[in-house]
Amino acid sequence: MTIYIVDIEAVDTRYTKQWKEHLPNQLRKSTNAEVVTISGGETPQATTPGAFLNFGGTNIYKSKQLEQIGEMFCNGKIKSGDYFLYTDAWNPTVIQLRYMAELLGVDIRIGGLWHAGSYDPHDFLGRLIGDKPWVRNAERSMFACYNDNFFATQFHIDLFLQSFKNKDNPVQWQHVDESRIKKVGWPMEYLKNSLDSYKGMPKKDIILFPHRIAPEKQLNIFDDLKTQLPEYEFVVCQEKELTKNEYHNLLGEAKLVFSANLQETLGISWYEGVLVDTIPMVPDRLSYSEMAIHEFKYPNIWTKNFDQYTKNKDQVVGKIKDYMENYDNYKRALEKQKLVLSRMFFSGEALYKAIK
């Protein structure tokens, strides 16, 4: 078996660059298979504002990947038993891949890692495109092309399945083969080693906002907290245009990572924070509900929207002060949180097993 990685374009400041480097080696080690990466070449580093891709550039990238796949079929390189792993399942080229494989009689398996889509009303696609028939049908087609639809959290699975509800009769469900759904951790076990050098840094009174600047991340709440707590330094990481090393240095120095997110199907930045002993303060909603231990979750209602935040501002401020002034009291809980995230959500073991 050859495993073909159809990767997502690498952006220097995001995990996608690390995946490009680490995932092929992790797959080789875990499966003993030949691993080949199908890349679309260079990509624009400037992402579309509020998103994590360049919406023009990503289609150029995917088109170049499809061209290579077509050439490999023409040259007879693709064999029955081979496995194609899409590191971003929202890639329409999987439809053409399935088309070629079935018409040419090549029995391949395909897996895709789902990150987001129009089925999430707070995601970029959900906000701008919504539930238009073309996009929902496209996502269902891509889902059907994958033998393995990989999701990192149960929250994400449930959110995705909502898109299969009958719009005219929400009680009825359109057919969906749930045996194609697999909950696995993301293949990011490399993070523990790569962040080791940032552990043990002297902590400062810094509170980080490590998320994209987008409406669903509720930056306005973070900005208001800055005015309420002038004794602490509030940093919006994306405004600083940091390199990955600079970002990790800041993460190692900070005491707290804050989230009021309305959209989160996993959340890598707060895991990175936990790995360098930075306290996460996250709402009890979305994927956080199943991932965070109780010491680090605050009630959903506190930041459900800006109006609710205004009503509950004293509680939010009080919680932040507790974390900042009593940081050492949370070290044991941080170790527990680190173990939960590393074993259940950021290890590729279940993914590699499914591929084998």
Image (cartoon, helix red, strand yellow):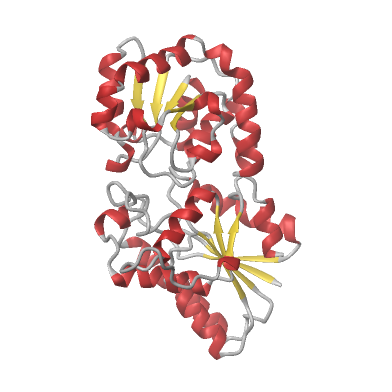
In the picture, measured across the screen, residue 272 lies left or right of residue 139, that is: right
Say which quadrant the N terminus sits in: bottom right
Residue occupying image coordinates x 54% and y 23%: 295
Residue 46: percent from left, percent from top: 32, 50
Residue occupying image coordinates x 31% and y 59%: 55
Relative vertical location of residue 268 with respect to residue 88 in this rendering, above or below = above
Looking at the image, can residue 349 be seen? yes
Between 145 and 195, which is closer to the camera in this rendering?
145
Relative vertical location of residue 309 with respect to residue 75 in this rendering, above or below = above
Residue 26: percent from left, percent from top: 67, 53
State the residue lying farthest toward the right.
Answer: 32
Residue occupying image coordinates x 65% and y 51%: 348
Residue 59: percent from left, percent from top: 36, 66
Relative vertical location of residue 137 with respect to residue 261 in this rendering, above or below = below
In the picture, measured across the screen, residue 111 lies left or right of residue 57, that is: right
Say which quadrant the C terminus sits in: bottom right
Between 236 and 38, which is closer to the camera in this rendering?
236
Between 176 and 1, which is closer to the camera in this rendering?
176
Residue 77: percent from left, percent from top: 63, 81
Looking at the image, can residue 189 be seen? no
